[in-house]
Each structure stands twice: as C-alpha cells, then as structure tokens.
Image: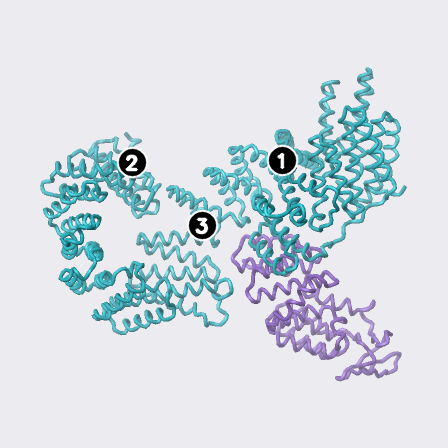
Chain colours: A purple, B cyan
C-alpha cells in the first residue's frame, strides 16, 4: 500500500494546487481559472461554471482541468488494502469515467494499470493507459510523472521488455532525478528476471540498493527484490541477509508480509 | 576573520558511468558476492567496448581486492610502465594493496617505482588521479617514518602540483609544512634546520592567502610551532590563543555539516600547544621550578588527551596519543606523578577504547606489531565489553596471524563464535583465520575454525561449503567417523543448502553400493524435500526411483516405475513454462532426461525378463531403439546396444543378438560392453539366465579355437569363473594353456594357470587345483601372481581333510618371496590374513589373532585394502571373543581396540551396530577384570 501511495503521490503532488478543494482549469495560454463546477463532454470539451456563469471551453483551449476528487478513489484504496482487488478495479474504472479530463481520471488509471501489470495482464494495463494518453495527448507524461513508471511495468507485462531495455539503460545514467534513475534500474532488473536472467536481475536490484539508499521507496523495494531473487536461486543465506536489512530499515514495509518463510 | 566550513560532499558525484560501475563492483566484493562481481566485470567489458584499457585497470583492482597480488604483478610484467599510464594506475593500486596488507617494503618499492616514472611529469590519467592522492599520503607517511623527509617532500609536492582540487592542494600543503617541520626538528644540522623552517614559513604564508578554512587553522598551528622552534615561544602561544575562538566556531559549523573529525583543525592546534607546553615543562624542571613544570605538564596532558579522544582519524590525534604516553612516562620518572585519565563511563569509555584501537591499527599498519599488541591487550583488559571490542579482536587477530600464533587464533575462533554469533565483523575475522589454517594445511586448526563459523554464523553463505570440505578432508585421510560427525552437523545446521544435498547424495550413493536400499531412498527423499523445484530436485527423484527399482521389493519396484515414468513426463522439453529449461539449467536438464530414459530402458528390460511378457519386450525394444536414434554417440550408447542384444537373447533371437554384439564391438571396442562380441554374447546370456546359449557359445569357441584370440578366450573363461560356471571356465583356461600361441605370451599363461587352479577349486576338484597352482609356482616362481596363487594354494591345503599344514606353509613361503620385492600394504595384508588362517590351522590361536590385529588396525588406502581390513577386524573380533569367553581376559582389550577401529573406519557398515555392542561389552568386561 505504501508503495502505491508513493506512486499516487508523485502524480497528485504534481497535480495539486495549494488548496485541494479548489477546482481549476489550466488554460493553454498559461492562465489558471478557478471554477465552481466542471462538466466534461466525451470529446473533451468542458462546460465550466465560474462566478455563477457557464463558460464553454473547447479541448484545445485548455491543458487540463482539476475537478472534484471522486469518492471511488478512496474506496478503491481501502478495497486494495483489504485484498478485494476485483471490486477495487471496478471502483477505479468508475473514477476514470466520472473524472474524464479532470486529472483524477489519470490518477485512477495509473493505479488501475499498476494492478493489471502486477497480475501480468499487460493488455488491460495498456488499454487503461491508452485512454489517458488519448485524453491528454503528448502532454500526458509531463502532466502525470507517475505515468512513465506504470508504462514501463505495462510493457514488461506485455513481454516487450527487450524493446524497453535500451531506453531504461539510458535513463539510469541520464535521467534528471534519482527516483527515475532508481525505477529505471529496477524495471530493467524485472525485465531480466522475466527472461530468467536472475544474475543480471540481481545486479540491477543490488545497484539500486547500493546507489539509491536516499530514495526510500525504491530502496525498500530493491531490498525486497534482492532477497526474493536470491531465494529463487536457492541462496537462502544471502536472501536472509537482505530481508533482514529490509526489516531493520523499513519495519513498516508492506513487503515484509511477502517474505517467504 | 570568518571561518568557512567546507560544503558537505554532494550526494551523488558518480557521474561517470564507468566509475560508477567500478565502485559497484567494489561493493559486491565487500559483500563477498564474488560470483556476481565476476558477472559484473564481464558486463563491464561488454558495455564499454571503447574503454578496454580502463576495464583492465578495474579488473586489476578486483584481483587486488581478492589479494591476488601475484596475478597483478604478472599483468604488469608485460606492460611498458614508462609510457602506459593505465599500467601506472595498476602499479599504484598494487602499492596500496601491499600497504593495506602490511607489506611495507613491497608497498614502498612500488610507490617509489611509480614516483620515479612520473618525476617531472604531469599526472593527467583519470585512473591515476583517482588514487594518487591517497597513495601520496601513505607513501609520504612511510617515508617520514623512515626519516626520508626529502623524499616525502617530493611526493607531497607531486600531489600538490598534479591536483586540480583546491581543497586537496591545501590539505597536502599542510602535510608538506608538517613534513618540513618534522625534518627540521629531527636534524642536528643547523643549515638543514634553518632551510626547513624557512620552507615551513613559505608554505604556511602562501596558505594564509586562501580561504579561512580548516587547513588555514592547521597551517597556522604549524606556523606557531615553527615560531616556538625559532625561540619565539610567547608569540607562538599568543597566536594559538588567538586562533582558538574562531577554530571552535569553525568546528561547530563542520559538525553541523557532518564533516569527518579527521578534518577538524583543533587536533593540530591542541597538539602543537601540547608540545610547546611539554617542552616548556621540561625546561622549567631543569631550572628547578617543579610547580611550574607540573602545571605545564598538566596543560600538555589535557591537550594531548583531548586531541586523541575527540578527533578520530586525524594524524594529530594519533601523534597526541603517543605523546601522551611519553608525557606519562616523563611525569612518573621525573616527578613521580601518576597521570591517570579521568574516570569515565558509558559513551566516553567506549570512545577511549575506540581511539586506543585506532592507534593500535595504525601501529599494525606501520609494522609495529609488538606495540600494537600491547596497546590492544591493555585496552581489552581495561574495557572488555564495548561495541568496539570486535574491532579490537580484529586487530589482535591480524597481529597473531603476523606472528603465526595458531593456538591463540584457535582460541579466538572459539571465543568469537561464543560471544559474537552471527556478527558480520566477527565472521570476517574467522574467515581470515580459516584461510590461514587452510593455507598452512593445519587440519585441526581448520576444523576448529570452520566449525566455529558453521555453528555460530548461520548468515555466512560460505559456512556450509566449508563444513562440507572439512568433512571431505576427514574422509580422505581415512577418518570416516569424524567425517560422519561433521556431515551430521552440517545436515542439522544447514538443511536445504547445496552442500547438505551433496552430503545426502553421497550417503545415498554409499547406501546403494552397500545395497541398503531403504537408506538410499530415505537420503534421496531428503534431498528432494529440501530442494527448490528444479534440477536438483529432479535429480533426487531419479535417485529415489533408481533405488526403489534395485531394491527387489515388489511394492517399492512398482513405485519406482511409476515415479520414473512421471519424471520423464515432467522433464519433457516441449512442456510450456517448464522450470527445468531456463538458460542456466537447459543443458543439464536434457542430460538428466537422457539418463532417465536410459534407466527406463534398463527397467523395461529387467521386467520383460522377469515377466516373460512380449508386450514389455516390445516396449523395451522401442525405448532402446528410440534412445539410440535420439542420442547417437552418447556415453550410454554401448550399454544401450548391449541391452538390445540382451533383449534379443531373451526372445531367443541369438543370431540377431550376435549381430548387435558384433556391431557394438566394431563401434565401441574401447568400452567395457563392447570389448569383444563373443564376450558380450556370453555375458548377456548369463545375465539373462540363458545358460545353454552361453554354453553353446563356449563350446563353439572350444571347437574352433583358431577363430578367436587367446586373450578373448581367457576373458570368456574369467566371465564363466565369475558366474561360477566352473566347467566352462576350466575348459576355457585349459584351452588357453594348451594353445601354442600362449607360449609366446607368458603373462597370459600365468594368468590362465592361476585361473585354472581357481576353476578346479570351485568345481571341488582339489587335486587338480593343487596341481595347477603348483605348476604355476614351480614354473614362474618370481611372477607377481604367485602371491595370490600361493595364498590360494595354502587355503586349499588347509581345506583338505585332514589339512596339509606343512604344504600350506610351504605355499605361503613361496608367496612370501614375492612380497619381499613388492611390499605394498594390500599384498602384506593378504599375506597376514593367510598366515592367520595357517596359524589357526596349526592350533595357534594367539598368533592367528595377532596377524588379524596387525591388519585390522591399519588405515585403508584403497577399497581393496579396506575390504581386507574389514575382514581382519570382523574375523579378529570373533576370534578374540571366543578366547575371552574361554577365559583369556586379556582378549577384551583386543576386542575393544578392534571394534573401535571398525567403528572409526566403517561407521555406516551394516556390521557397525554389532561392533558397537562388542565395544561396550569389551570395555565393561575389561573394567570388571
């Protein structure tokens, strides 16, 4: 859950203005217009209510809108924590529909695609992300930074790891922020693990452990994946060492429950 | 003046991906993940195809991390150091490695080699620049210790001139100034003194124009000291006082920025002040002012002690520690004052201990092991239990390794295991001790240290492998009981590890060899249950099925068949997502499948023979032919062809069988199965119980001896002998002896004579046996075979009614003559056993037992020798028991010796339980008597 929350945070923090309750339309000319209500048409045109007046806006006039946060998002989070993934998916799909073009659809879509990718259902994850990319166009990744990580996971789930690997290798060195570097490193490890190159995967996870101790979310996950991969190789002593490090450094980690006996 | 704190280092300065990767490989080595480090090293070569020279430097660095200095020396031999800057980088790393190992002479040689090459040159290669500063600091320190101040100055200047970093430059300017001051103080030559003090002035004056950083304060401290040396003591003291407030402020800022204490300036200032105070104290005492002397000494002590305690890693702190000791001694000697540091507790105690430890480590590095040992032992005595105690034990272990104190090291190994279980640092110390014991082939020491590791450090990945190796070593030196104990412990402590699987597999194989099928199945089942799904588990499943098939228990055989067939299905390479065919396992899984199929074919063949079932025969034929088609030229091909021949014999198709055997002999003449077609036919027929077929083949051979080579006829004879077909065997050997071709082959004739004797013996024709053996001994008295022939003849005479004792003795005398020239343990043991039988025949039970005892207490050197030892012990115990029961109480002692020897050498033998009882009984009876 904590990891998911971190994922969401990277999206939401980028999206939120100072006040979470404020509805805003971000215009293409750079203006930010506070509004009382937003209705979105299927083609992306909006009818916004500002100062009691209805203001129609064509899709090309605005970059994105920030609408009211749908209740389904919080419900989905609780359902996931309770293990009821199917119901959570339904909630998220509902949020995507209700909040079209209003930022929360992207938040929900990222969460939903992540769930699909974890299950290995690359096709569904891809479909979900495509909805957002169609709505937000070329801006999607810059508007929602968390999108890129889920896109990578989706590609891995679709078996397209080989295509993605060179890009990830570049990002490990050149990405401007360390969280992206760390994530690129780990996804590259996942790709290698998927083709049973466990040594290669281990090296990538260990690089993340060593170089990204200051990125707790990624560091935590890397410790778990390192232990898990050693376990797969039958190297129980090494596995224990990294699981112990995980428990010591991140005692509240959601990964601790996943450590095999 | 405003003091400037240095900026803390940025979080990630590893921009160069190559450097980043080299650093990561260093991390893997630190974690002892050597396999992964090698993998990363291979990747480095692939990922940086245009930087192969840098890769070589990195690879050398990895070799050096593993202590493989000789390998790196070899690399450098083929390089031109004068022009090859990468080789220079490697040379520098080699020097630093020797330095870290405490091999100061080698370190100095290589450092100086580097300096000579680079004298007057700019150092620009990034791989050299990376390590040069650290190397320069160490080299200058070594040179100073040797009093080579001018060389040290050159080294420091080279670093100053070659660095682009202002911070590094200033750091080294401080070192250069200190070096010049030390030079001045150590020299009695006024010219030198003056020149060096001038140099101090020049360097420190230059530094005053830079920023008011920590190095500025250190330089000013040195400058004050210079002033004192020039007689301007009061100016020096004033200057130090002026610097104090700002220096304190600077240190506060440095502390807030988490900078290391080694860079804090007040260590230098305190040291300088302490030195001045100490010298003034001496002067005061000389002039009779004891009170002033004490006061000044007190001030100096305070400065030295605080510098030592608070500035970990600073050279001035270490100097202060030594100076403090000097001051203590002076106070005691001159003023009868005991200088005791204030009583401390908790954190301060630990800090003092830690600092003493730092000093000891520094002394070890400089080769002053005696002083270091004194320091460490004193510290441990005073502070036996702090969180730095393991560090102290680490230093102590290095000293004892240097001094080769094995007893102490073994004691330390035990202590570490007891007091610091599962501690990573303690484990590292143990590993070092283990390496020494192994390198010195100290068997006992290795066992003590490895068992300490294995029992107490479950987190150490190498522990199970090491325990396996010491168990293996025990077995190799014949101490099977000890080997068993170690393996039992390994299984208890590390179930499920590859070494544990190896032990269980060894036990299973041993059980199979001794036909303890239930034990074999149990051992393989443990391997299966403890293995992850995959190749190892599948191998265990094959072992289980094989053991069950060989058990001759109908129920188990049925299970074995089903399990084997299931395993074959599971190993099908066409199965989707198979766990057996990942990149690492593919080849060996295919090899395993081949073995499974071969085993199935053997199983079908055996069942077809048992049940006389045509359907099973067809299945067996399909399987065998399928195997030959799918695996042409495999290792099992000779055996598969042989089994096909057997199958034909089962079906009564002798002609087809003969054709297969001929084909086999043509394709695989070197194999056991294929050495001769006739031999194969006879063997197969015997194995199938088709005695008539075998007899017909032999009869044909006897009728047409010219169609066969003599050696082949002999081998058929041997086959018949092994199968107790005495008549056919005797016929074959007689044929060989009679044939004129054998006259040209003495060795063959000898063997045929001996074998004829044995055949006649087997057939109960004793007179004929005697004649054959006597002929051999008379005709070829010096042949090695006479040993066995003489022993056999002796046994024949002893079996006669009544026994012919004189003749038996004569036969053994003939055999003994051979023994003189061939005194192997096996031959000697055979003779002693035969003598034992002779003495028994002569009614001399004591002498008989003595011969058995002599053989029984030997350590077997081969399986054949082991069989003789075993026989001697079993017979000996039986004989001694009879003697003891008849009233010879001394025999109990012999029973105890022999039964214990049996348990030591054959701990898993089926007779071991009986021997255990005999041993207990013997000990009890010996006590009672």
Badge nearest the viewer, 1 or 2: 1
Quarter of the image where the N terminus of chain B is located: top right
> Secondary structure under badge 1?
helix
Chain identity of mark 2: B
Q: Is residue B266 visible?
A: yes
B103 relative position to B209: left or right: left
CA gap, disc 2 to disc 3? 32 Å
CA gap, disc 3 to disc 1? 46 Å
Q: Residue furthest right?
A: B1
Placement of A161 over or under B485, stated as above or below? below
Placement of A237 over or under A76, stated as above or below? above
Q: Horizontal and vertical percent for residue B649? A: 23, 68
CA gap, disc 1 to disc 2? 62 Å
B638 relative position to B697: left or right: right
- Quickly name the residue at label 2: B922
Tag 1 and tag 2, C-beta contact below 8 Å: no
Label ID, residue B105: 1
- Quickly name the residue at label 3: B491
Q: Horizontal and vertical percent for residue B211? A: 86, 44
Quadrant hosting residue A226? bottom right
Mark 2 closeness class: few <14, some 14–19, many ≥20 residues within 10 Å: many
What residue sits 68% from the left and 36% below the top? B358
């Amino acid at each position: 859950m904590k990891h998911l929350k971190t994922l969401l945070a990277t999206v939401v923090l980028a999206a939120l203005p100072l006040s979470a309750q404020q509805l805003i339309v971000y215009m293409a000319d750079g203006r930010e217009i506070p509004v009382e209500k937003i209705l979105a048409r299927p083609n992306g045109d909006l009818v916004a209510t500002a100062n009691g007046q209805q203001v129609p806006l064509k899709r090309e006039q605005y970059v994105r809108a920030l609408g009211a946060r749908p209740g389904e998002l919080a419900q989905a989070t609780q359902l996931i924590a309770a293990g009821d993934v199917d119901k959570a998916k339904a909630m998220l799909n509902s949020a995507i529909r209700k909040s079209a073009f209003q930022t929360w659809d992207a938040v929900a879509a990222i969460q939903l695609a992540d769930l699909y990718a974890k299950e290995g259902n690359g096709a569904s994850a891809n479909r979900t992300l495509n909805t957002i990319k169609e709505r937000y166009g070329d801006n999607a990744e810059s508007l929602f930074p968390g999108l890129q990580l889920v896109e990578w996971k989706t590609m891995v789930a679709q078996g397209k790891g080989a295509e993605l690997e060179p890009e990830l290798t570049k990002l490990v060195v050149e990405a401007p922020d360390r969280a992206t570097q760390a994530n690129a490193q780990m996804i590259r490890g996942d790709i290698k693990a998927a083709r049973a190159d466990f040594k290669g995967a281990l090296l990538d996870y260990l690089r993340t452990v060593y170089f990204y101790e200051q990125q707790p979310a990624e560091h935590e996950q890397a410790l778990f994946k390192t232990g898990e991969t050693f376990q797969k190789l039958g190297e129980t002593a090494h596995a224990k060492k990294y699981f112990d490090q995980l428990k010591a450094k991140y005692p509240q980690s959601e990964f601790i429950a996943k450590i095999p006996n | 003046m405003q003091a400037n704190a240095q900026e803390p280092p940025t979080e990630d300065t590893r921009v160069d991906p190559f450097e980043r990767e080299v650093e990561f490989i260093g991390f893997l080595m630190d974690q002892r993940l050597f396999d992964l480090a090698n993998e990363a090293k291979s990747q480095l070569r692939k990922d940086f195809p245009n930087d192969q020279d840098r890769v070589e430097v990195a690879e050398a660095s990895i070799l050096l991390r593993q202590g493989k200095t000789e390998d790196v020396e070899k690399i450098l031999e083929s390089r031109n150091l004068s022009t090859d800057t990468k080789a220079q980088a490697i040379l520098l790393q080699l020097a630093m490695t020797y330095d870290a190992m405490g091999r100061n002479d080698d370190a100095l040689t290589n450092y100086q080699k580097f300096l000579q090459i680079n004298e007057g040159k700019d150092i620009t290669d990034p791989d050299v620049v990376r390590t040069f500063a650290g190397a320069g600091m160490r080299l200058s320190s070594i040179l100073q210790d040797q009093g080579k101040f001018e060389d040290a100055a050159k080294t420091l200047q080279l670093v100053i001139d070659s660095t682009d970093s202002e911070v590094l430059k200033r750091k080294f300017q401080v070192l250069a100034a200190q070096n010049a001051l030390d030079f001045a103080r150590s020299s009695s030559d006024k010219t030198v003194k003056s020149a060096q003090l001038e140099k101090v002035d020049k360097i420190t004056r230059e530094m005053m124009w830079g920023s008011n950083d920590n190095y500025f304060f250190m330089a000013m401290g040195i400058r004050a000291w210079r002033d004192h040396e020039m007689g301007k003591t009061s100016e020096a003291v004033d200057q130090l006082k002026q610097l104090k407030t700002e220096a304190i402020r600077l240190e506060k800022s440095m502390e807030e920025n988490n900078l290391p204490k080694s860079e804090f300036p007040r260590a230098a200032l305190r040291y300088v002040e302490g030195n001045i105070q100490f010298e003034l104290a001496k002067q005061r005492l000389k002039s009779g002012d004891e009170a002033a002397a004490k006061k000044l000494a007190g001030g100096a002590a305070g400065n030295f002690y605080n510098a030592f305690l608070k500035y970990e890693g600073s050279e001035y702190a270490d100097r202060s520690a030594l100076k403090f000791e000097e001051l203590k001694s002076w106070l005691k000697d001159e003023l009868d004052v005991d200088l005791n540091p204030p009583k401390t507790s908790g954190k301060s105690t630990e800090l003092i201990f830690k600092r003493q430890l730092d000093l000891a480590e520094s002394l070890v590095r400089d080769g002053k092991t005696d002083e270091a040992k004194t320091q460490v032992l004193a510290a441990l005595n005073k502070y036996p239990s702090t969180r730095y105690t393991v560090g102290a034990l680490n230093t102590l272990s290095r000293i004892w390794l240097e001094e080769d104190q094995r007893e102490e090291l073994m004691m330390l190994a035990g202590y570490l295991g007891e007091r610091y279980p599962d501690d990573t640092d303690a484990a590292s110390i143990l590993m070092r001790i283990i390496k020494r014991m192994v390198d010195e082939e100290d068997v006992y020491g290795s066992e003590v240290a490895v068992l300490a590791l294995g029992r107490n450090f479950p987190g150490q990945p190498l522990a199970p492998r090491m325990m396996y190796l010491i168990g293996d070593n025990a077995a190799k030196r014949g101490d099977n009981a000890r080997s068993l104990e170690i393996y039992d412990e390994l299984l208890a402590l590390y179930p499920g590890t590859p070494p544990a699987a190896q032990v269980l597999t060894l036990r299973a194989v041993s059980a199979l060899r001794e036909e303890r099928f239930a034990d074999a199945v149990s051992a393989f089942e443990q391997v299966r249950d403890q293995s992850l799904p995959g190749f190892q588990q599948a191998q265990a499943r094959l072992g289980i099925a094989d053991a069950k098939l060989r058990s001759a228990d109908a129920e188990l055989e049925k299970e074995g068949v089903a399990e084997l067939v299931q395993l074959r299905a599971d190993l099908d390479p066409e199965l989707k997502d198979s766990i057996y065919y990942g990149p690492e396992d593919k080849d060996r899984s295919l090899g395993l499948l081949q073995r499974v199929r071969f085993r199935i074919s053997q199983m079908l063949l055996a069942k077809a023979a048992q049940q006389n079932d045509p359907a099973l025969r067809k299945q067996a034929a399909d399987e065998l032919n399928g195997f030959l088609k799918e695996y042409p030229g495999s290792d099992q091909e000779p055996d598969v062809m042989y089994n096909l021949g057997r199958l034909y014999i089962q079906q009564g198709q002798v002609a087809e069988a003969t054709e297969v055997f001929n084909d086999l002999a043509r394709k695989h003449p070197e194999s056991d199965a294929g050495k001769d077609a006739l031999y194969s036919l006879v063997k197969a027929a015997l194995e199938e119980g088709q005695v008539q077929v075998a007899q017909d083949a032999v009869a044909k051979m006897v009728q047409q001896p010219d169609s066969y080579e003599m050696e082949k006829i002999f081998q058929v004879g041997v086959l018949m002998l092994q199968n107790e077909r005495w008549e056919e065997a005797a016929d074959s050997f007689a044929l060989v002896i009679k044939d004129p071709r054998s006259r040209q082959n003495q060795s063959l004739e000898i063997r045929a004579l001996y074998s004829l004797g044995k055949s006649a013996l087997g057939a109960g024709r004793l007179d004929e046996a005697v004649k054959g053996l006597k002929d051999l001994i008379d005709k070829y008295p010096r042949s090695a075979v006479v040993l066995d022939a003489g022993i056999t003849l002796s046994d024949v005479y002893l079996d006669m009614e009544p026994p012919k004792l004189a003749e038996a003795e004569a036969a053994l005398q003939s055999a003994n003559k051979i023994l003189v020239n061939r005194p192997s343990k096996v031959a000697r043991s055979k003779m002693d056993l035969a003598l034992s039988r002779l003495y028994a025949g002569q009614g001399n039970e004591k002498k008989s037992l003595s011969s058995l005892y002599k053989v029984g207490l030997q350590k077997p050197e081969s399986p054949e020798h082991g069989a003789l030892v075993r026989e001697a012990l079993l017979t000996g115990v039986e004989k001694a028991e009879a003697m003891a029961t008849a009233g010879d109480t001394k025999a109990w002692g012999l029973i105890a010796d022999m039964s214990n020897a049996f348990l030591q050498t054959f701990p898993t033998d089926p007779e071991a339980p009986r021997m255990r009882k005999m041993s207990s009984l013997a000990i009890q009876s010996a006590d009672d008597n």
